[in-house]
Structure formats: C-alpha cells, structure tokens
Image (cartoon, rainbow, N blue to C red):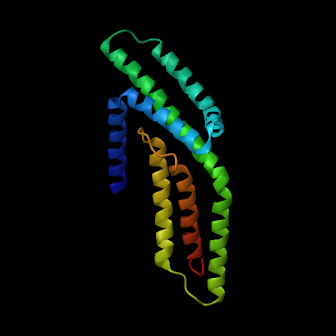
C-alpha cells in the first residue's frame, strides 16, 4: 500500500514539475552539465557523450516537431509549445547523464567485478575459518545497493544542475555495496 502511495505522489510531483518548470532552468541545467563534464573529463569526453546521446535527442526532436506543427497561436498552444521544448531539454539532460554514467561505468566495471569477486573470496575464507557472516552487514549491503540505485535514477531524472561527480561516485558505491552484500552472504544458500 505504501509503495503505491509513494509512486502516486512521485508521479504527481513529476507532472507538476513538468507543467511548471521554466525552460530557462532546463537550458541552464543542460549548459552546466556540459561545462562540468568538459572541466572534469575534458572536451573530448564531453563530445563523446554528446555524440552518443545524439540519436535519442534527434528522434525525440523529430517527434516533437510533428506534434508542434498543428499548434496555433492561442495561449494554451503557446504554453504547450513551451512544454514540448522543456520536454526536449529534459530528455536531453537525462540522455546526457545516462551516457556520462555509461562512460564512467566502462571505467568502473573492473572495479565492480573486482569488489564482487573479492567479496566472494572473503566469504569463502570465512566459511573455511568457521567464522560467521554478519546478517546485519548483509542487510546493510542490500539496502545500500537499493539506495544507490534509487539515487542514480533520481540523479538521472532531476531537472536541476547536479555535480557530474555523482556518476563516478555511483560506480564506487555500487562496488562497495556489492562487496558488503557478497562478503556477508549466509554459509548455505
């Protein structure tokens, strides 16, 4: 029951944000994200992320162009045209962040794999040493993984400028939470 309530509140909040957020705020977010990426990883990384997300932006823009073609000059249609533009900017920010996360994931996948394998071997060593795994640490690892996953989705969808450091931090926290999760699995599954 609480999950449905939370999902409904989030959906209503998303619609209210979509209806009320000014396009200038989304433009500022779009520029800020690109400037941060260029400052942190270099102009080449920024260009790679832009090129990788260009197909999604082009498809969305083509769909928006056909939707906007039938609009007139009434106040509602002008508001709707502004919402279409805001939606395009929001989709551009989401795809840009997703591609940035993918770029950092390519670097971080070896870290995640190493943490998972290390956690597995720590578990095996503990089994042979007759020490017990901690169910509390296991639960902390599971909950940390869930929190990091939800934070990642929130970071992808928030229409405000966010630090680009979140992407590599997500990769590192996923590795730590998986290590904690796997290292403290129960002896018998």
Q: Position of residue 138 (x, y in %)?
A: 51, 73
Give the residue at x 50% y 80%: 134
* The C terminus lies in quadrant: bottom right
Q: Position of residue 32 (x, y in %)?
A: 48, 36
Res 80 quadrant in image: top left
Residue 189 higher or lower than 90, as above or below: below
Q: Is residue 69 visible?
A: yes
* The N terminus lies in quadrant: bottom left
Q: State left or right for residue 3 relative to residue 180.
A: left
Res 84 quadrant in image: top left
Residue 50 higher or lower than 4, as above or below: above
Give the residue at x 51% y 16%: 66
- In the picture as drawn, the residue positioned furthest to the bottom comes out as 130
Out of 32 and 85, give the one closest to the viewer: 32
Residue 83 higher or lower than 32, as above or below: above
Res 55 quadrant in image: top right
């Amino acid at each position: 029951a609480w999950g449905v309530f939370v999902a409904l509140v989030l959906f209503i909040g998303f619609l209210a944000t979509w209806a009320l957020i000014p396009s200038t705020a989304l433009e500022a977010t779009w520029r800020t994200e690109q400037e941060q990426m260029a400052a942190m990883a270099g102009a080449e990384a920024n260009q790679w992320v832009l090129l990788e997300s260009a197909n999604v932006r082009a498809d969305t823009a083509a769909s928006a162009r056909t939707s906007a073609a039938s609009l007139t000059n009434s106040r509602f249609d002008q508001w709707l045209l502004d919402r279409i533009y805001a939606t395009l900017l929001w989709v551009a920010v989401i795809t840009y962040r997703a591609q940035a996360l993918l770029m950092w994931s390519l670097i971080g996948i070896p870290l995640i794999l190493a943490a998972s394998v290390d956690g597995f071997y720590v578990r095996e060593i503990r089994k042979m040493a007759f020490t017990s795994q901690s169910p509390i640490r296991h639960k902390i690892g599971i909950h940390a993984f869930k929190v990091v996953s939800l934070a990642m989705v929130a970071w992808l969808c928030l229409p405000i400028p966010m630090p680009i450091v979140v992407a590599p931090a997500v990769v590192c926290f996923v590795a730590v939470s998986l290590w904690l999760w796997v290292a403290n699995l129960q002896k018998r599954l």
